[in-house]
């Protein structure tokens, strides 16, 4: 049963494609500068929004550190705290963590930090895989509205939003960038 | 002098070849006259215009469960249920555990019926002691005590030599012999008709041959002894063919069929509905069609309900543990009227013949007819009254009836036994 | 989403639902390869294992699956002759606030009747000769993982077709997914009208396994009244057992599966059992994963009602 895809219209562009690319590059440099040479660094992207940013960061950190930085992905569906209240069956994606996490420094990547619940679920799932030395949360955009005491260690944009607005980070689409969107009055349901 | 004039109804009396508008005059518990226009004084006049007037229905297969299982039904509740169904006389079978294989129980049933019953009750004794199929019942004694037929009811007499002896012996007392045609070994653990549905439900099935094998045997015995055997009840198309073959040759093989075997198939068991668990089982659509045809052409002379009330606990349990049976007295006539007569598969005359005239004839009772000087047992039905079956409103203790919720017409309006209203305007006149 | 609150039989599922369960099982396969083979998806939910008739392997499989989903588990092994009616058992479980009930019973239809009287979801873990849907899903999942698709695949079903709920469910599942099913058993062990369900019926093992891509066996014993249907297990073994000679008639890469418990030397020879061992082990591992999928999909379904 698909969710209704509301018709979204653009309210504001926070960053265009080249600005986004530059911002991610800057994020990678900031993250790396706080890492030590001895750290065993891994990058984990939270599906689905964190996949593309995680890929970019992993590539970048590999270059900066001169050694392969392993890349993994987490699907947090089975760890959601609202799994029973959705009213539909969420599609469970594949989690791929093919490397040990014990004592690793995990760079946890997502596109937008909002309520903090997704990150909470991701942390719980990560801990089931092992005991990282440290987890650093990297997001492209953060907005107000935390429901849990969770903060990003690194973010590229702080975004002010009105009620009813969503923040979207697009990396693999026709138009890439960071946008604020709002649903039109009438929702078009599929 | 007590007089009742039933005016202007459609009188259907197959015994006298009547089917038309007429008046019926009942005097002091007997039929006095049946004629187009009866003029009379000092009679209570009942306007029967638009109604069906028939001889009281007679059921040859009813389980009143008293004595023995009063939790399922009593003579009081069962006869009231019968009256509400338009029945005025019942051939009562034995109760599991306390069977009518001796004169004491037969006399008990008769005296209890006289005291508590509101319609006529005729005991049908067992053929063998305890229905075990080993030794003969004192058939002479139970006949003298009032038994009108013998039957080991839902138990097959598997031993052919035993059946032969029963037939020879019962002949002497002129008691009709009923046979339950279902070979015990072939039926084994079966519950439902052996077929695709039983396979899909994972239930053990009773193959139709279990019935045909015994029906064939009874036919051969009937021929060799030149006596009559009545199959009670039948469920399969092949048995019908056997009946035709026998009757063509003048062999005295007769049969009865239930309303549920005429209207339902094994599909009714889907979802493990225990109300469809019955013995013999509901079979295929082909069997059902053959049974309807056999009633229509008279091969199967009699329709009998096999009224078998069960307690709630007996039905609300695993299908494989549930007790087979349908409590059918209160729905029989409306069901067959709506589903078979209205649709043209059966004439009203044949229906009344099968539910009243022929059963009475089989049991040698002077009933089932509106003939002067015979008892004034009359059933009056309303062909226009439309109502849904509601098992919770049954007078029978048993609510095990798979027709709950069916919209039917032809409900009993008045039931008169010996000239007295037992049911009037659809309600019991007695408490 | 699954259409019903219960999983009572393959016959109640459409192809879409079957595929959903198998795809979800894939996701859980990854979970079982983790160090912590557990996810909190069913945390706070209670699953009851209501086993009226014993089956250690099925019960343990459901137990592992429930625990891997972080559900609380109640194990009730009861004898039906204890006297408590099915209806009362349903009421007791409702009162206990159980979310999902896994029922195994030796009487066909008992889980169906229980499900009618209770709002919790019911999974049929095997009822008499009726169905054992999760086992069929496990067998089909195991075959799919190796063969990729069931469309046109030749699958032979051997063993006690008359009394085995697993064999029935397998038949329905395989035909729904487009496989060509051949049943091989003595005439007395073939239930009435089996061909109507879309299979070829043979009275020899040889004809059934010819060119088979997969063979699924069920246990044959003298229980359930088979002492009337078969003269002896010795006779069955001699003429029907899947031995290396008969196995050679199948395709060289044939998969041999058995729902267990195996009667070595009866329906399958010891040698073939050993040859089949890798697949049998896969089957058991997949058992947990497929049952996790079933529990997960029904638990979401159930809570939607509240």
Image (tube, coloured by chain):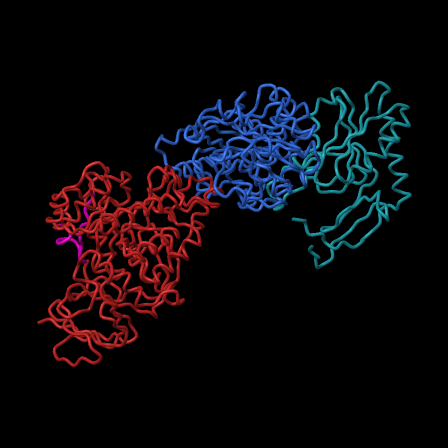
Chain colours: A cyan, B red, C blue
Q: Residue at x 12, y 80 (%)?
A: B41
Residue C15, percent across and down? 62, 45
Residue at the farthest left position: B1
Residue A25, percent across and down? 89, 35
Q: Is residue B306 visible?
A: yes
User: Is-magenta flag for residue B118?
Assistant: yes
In terms of image quadrants, where is residue C207?
top right
Range covered by the magenta-colored residues: B112-127
Residue B85, percent across and down? 27, 60
Closer to us: C71 or C81: C81
| Quadrant of the rendering where the N terminus of chain C is positioned | top right
Residue C125, percent across and down? 51, 34
In terms of image quadrants, where is residue B385?
bottom left
- Left or right placement of residue B36 versus residue C19 in this view: left
- Left or right placement of residue C156 versus residue B32 in this view: right
Q: Is residue C125 visible?
A: no
Closer to us: C261 or C288: C261
Q: How many marks?
A: 0
User: Is-magenta flag for residue A80?
Assistant: no
């Amino acid at each position: 049963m698909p969710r209704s895809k509301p018709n979204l219209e653009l309210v504001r562009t926070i960053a265009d494609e080249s600005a986004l690319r530059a911002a991610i590059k800057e994020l990678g440099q900031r993250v790396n500068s706080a890492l030590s040479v001895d750290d065993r660094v891994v990058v984990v992207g939270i599906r689905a929004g964190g996949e593309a940013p995680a890929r970019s960061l992993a590539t970048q950190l590999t270059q900066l550190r001169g050694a392969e930085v392993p890349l993994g992905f987490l699907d947090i569906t089975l760890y959601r705290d609202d799994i029973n209240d959705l009213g539909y069956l969420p599609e469970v994606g594949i989690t791929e963590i093919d490397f040990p996490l014990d004592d690793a420094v995990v760079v946890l990547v997502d596109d937008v930090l909002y309520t903090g619940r997704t990150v909470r679920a991701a942390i719980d799932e990560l801990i089931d895989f092992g005991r990282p030395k440290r987890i650093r949360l990297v997001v492209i955009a953060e907005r107000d509205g935390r429901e849990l005491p969770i903060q990003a260690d690194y973010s590229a944009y702080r975004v002010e939003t009105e009620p009813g607005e969503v923040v979207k980070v697009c990396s693999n689409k026709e138009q890439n960038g960071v946008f604020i969107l709002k649903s039109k009055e009438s929702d078009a349901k599929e | 002098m007590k007089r009742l004039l039933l005016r202007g109804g459609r009188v259907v009396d197959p015994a006298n070849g009547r089917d038309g508008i007429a008046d019926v005059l009942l005097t002091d518990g007997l039929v006095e006259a049946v004629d187009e226009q009866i003029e009379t004084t000092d009679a209570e006049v009942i306007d029967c215009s638009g109604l069906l007037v028939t001889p009281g229905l007679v059921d040859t297969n009813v389980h009143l469960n008293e004595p023995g299982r009063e939790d399922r039904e009593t003579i009081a509740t069962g006869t009231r249920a019968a009256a509400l169904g338009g029945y005025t006389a019942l051939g009562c079978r034995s109760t599991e555990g306390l069977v009518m294989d001796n004169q004491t129980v037969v006399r008990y049933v008769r005296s209890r019926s006289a005291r508590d019953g509101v319609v006529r009750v005729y005991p049908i004794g067992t053929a063998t002691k305890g229905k075990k199929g080993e030794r003969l019942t004192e058939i002479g004694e139970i006949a003298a005590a009032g038994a009108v037929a013998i039957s080991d009811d839902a138990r097959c007499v598997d031993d052919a030599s035993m059946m032969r002896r029963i037939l020879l012996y019962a002949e002497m007392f002129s008691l009709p012999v009923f046979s339950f045609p279902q070979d015990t070994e072939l039926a084994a653990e079966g519950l439902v008709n052996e077929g695709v549905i039983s396979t899909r439900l994972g239930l053990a099935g009773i193959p139709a041959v279990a019935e045909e094998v015994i029906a064939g045997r009874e036919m051969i015995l009937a021929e060799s002894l030149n006596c009559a055997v009545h199959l009670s009840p039948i469920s399969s198309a092949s048995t019908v063919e056997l009946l035709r073959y026998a009757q063509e040759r003048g062999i005295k093989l007769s049969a009865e069929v239930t309303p549920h075997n005429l209207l339902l198939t094994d599909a009714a068991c889907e979802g493990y509905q225990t109300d469809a668990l019955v013995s013999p089982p509901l079979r295929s659509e082909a069997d059902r069609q053959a049974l309807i045809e056999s009633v229509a052409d008279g091969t199967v002379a009699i329709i009998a309900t096999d009224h078998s009330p069960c307690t709630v606990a007996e039905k609300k349990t695993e299908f494989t543990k549930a007790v087979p049976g349908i409590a059918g007295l209160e729905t029989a006539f409306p069901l067959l009227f709506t589903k078979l007569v209205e649709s043209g598969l059966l004439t009203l005359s044949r229906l009344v013949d099968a539910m009243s005239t022929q059963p009475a004839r089989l049991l040698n009772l002077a009933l089932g007819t509106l003939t002067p000087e015979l008892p004034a047992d009359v059933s009056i039905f309303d062909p226009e009254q439309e109502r849904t079956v509601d098992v919770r409103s049954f007078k029978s203790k048993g609510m095990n009836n798979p027709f709950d919720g069916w919209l039917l017409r032809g409900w009993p309006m008045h039931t008169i036994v010996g000239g007295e209203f037992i049911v009037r305007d659809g309600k019991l006149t007695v408490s | 989403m699954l259409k019903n609150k219960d999983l009572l039989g393959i016959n109640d599922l459409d192809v879409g639902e079957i595929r959903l369960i198998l795809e979800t099982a894939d996701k859980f396969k990854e979970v079982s390869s983790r160090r912590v083979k557990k996810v909190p998806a069913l945390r706070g939910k209670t699953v009851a294992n209501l086993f009226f008739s014993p089956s250690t392997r099925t019960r343990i499989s459901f137990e592992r699956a429930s625990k891997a989903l972080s559900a609380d588990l109640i194990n009730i092994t009861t004898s039906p002759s204890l006297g408590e009616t099915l209806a009362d058992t349903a009421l007791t479980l409702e009162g206990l606030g159980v979310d999902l009930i896994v029922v195994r019973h030796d009487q066909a239809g008992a889980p169906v009747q229980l499900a009618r009287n209770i709002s919790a979801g019911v999974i049929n873990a095997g009822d008499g000769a009726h169905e054992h849907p999760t086992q069929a899903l496990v067998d089909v999942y195991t075959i799919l993982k190796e063969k990729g698709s069931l469309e046109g695949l030749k699958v032979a079903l051997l063993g006690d077709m008359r009394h085995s709920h697993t064999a029935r469910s397998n038949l329905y599942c395989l035909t729904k997914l487009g496989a060509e099913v051949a049943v091989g058993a003595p005439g007395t062990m073939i239930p009435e009208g089996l061909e109507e369900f879309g299979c070829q019926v043979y009275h020899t093992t040889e004809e059934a396994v010819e060119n088979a891509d997969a063979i699924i066996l069920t246990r044959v014993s003298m229980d359930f009244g088979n002492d009337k249907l078969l003269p002896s297990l010795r006779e069955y073994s001699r003429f029907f057992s899947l031995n290396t000679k008969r196995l050679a008639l199948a395709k060289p890469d044939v998969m041999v599966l058995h729902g267990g418990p195996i009667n070595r030397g009866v329906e399958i020879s010891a040698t073939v059992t050993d040859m089949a061992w890798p697949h049998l082990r896969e089957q058991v591992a997949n058992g947990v994963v497929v049952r996790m999928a079933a529990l997960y999909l029904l638990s979401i379904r159930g809570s939607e009602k509240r």
